[in-house]
Image (cartoon, helix red, strand yellow):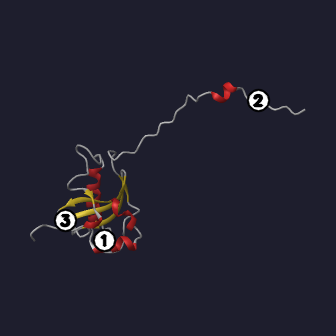
Amino acid sequence: MNRKKTVPLKAVSQKSSKSIKIKAVESERKPAWRFSTTDCGGCFKWPKGEKEELKILAKLHNFDSMPWTGPGGIEGKKHHFLSEESLSKKAKKRLEKLKLEDEIEHLFSFHLKGKERIIAIRHLNIANLLWYDPDHKVSPSRKKHT
């Protein structure tokens, strides 16, 4: 005896009362640091030694409580994305060697003190730390009339 089973129309057409809400990751979120991406070679290598690393960690610790944008945010005049045009030839060559040239538009510069900078690859709220730039040579200032 072959009977075809039928499913009641009510069971098939019922709307699900469950909904899934996914929170968007916004740039206002606080930063998260990744150290696995630090460049340990080349002219902008990450410093080794307790003194230099502790100085950087202290500064990054200060950023931890700040949002990326908005009032009191990190992003602004001192800490900003870098343009491809602003990068030095050495920085571009090093990115090519590391096979990171596709990340140029995500390079972010953190001002530490004076000329010192930390360069990271930023995706949303995550800063993949890349270079230590003590002499501001990744993206040197181009001052007028000098």
Residue at 32% from the left image edge and 68% from the top image edge: 46
| Quarter-of-image position of residue 4 | top right
Q: Secondary structure at mark 1?
A: helix
Q: Secondary structure at mark 2?
A: loop
Q: Where residue 140 sits in the image (x, y, percent)? A: 21, 68
Q: What amino acid is at disc 2?
A: Thr
Q: Is residue 67 above or below residue 47?
A: above
Q: CA distance from mark 3 to mark 2?
A: 75 Å
| Quarter-of-image position of residue 58 | bottom left
> Which of disc 1 and disc 2 is earlier in sequence?
2
Residue at 9% from the left image edge and 69% from the top image edge: 145
Q: Where residue 136 sits in the image (x, y, percent)? A: 22, 67
Q: Are marks 2 and 1 in contact (CB under 8 Å)?
A: no
Mark carried by residue 12? none
Q: CA distance from mark 3 to mark 1?
A: 16 Å
Residue at image mark 2: 6
> Which of disc 1 and disc 3 is earlier in sequence?
1
Of 21 and 145, nearer the camera is: 145
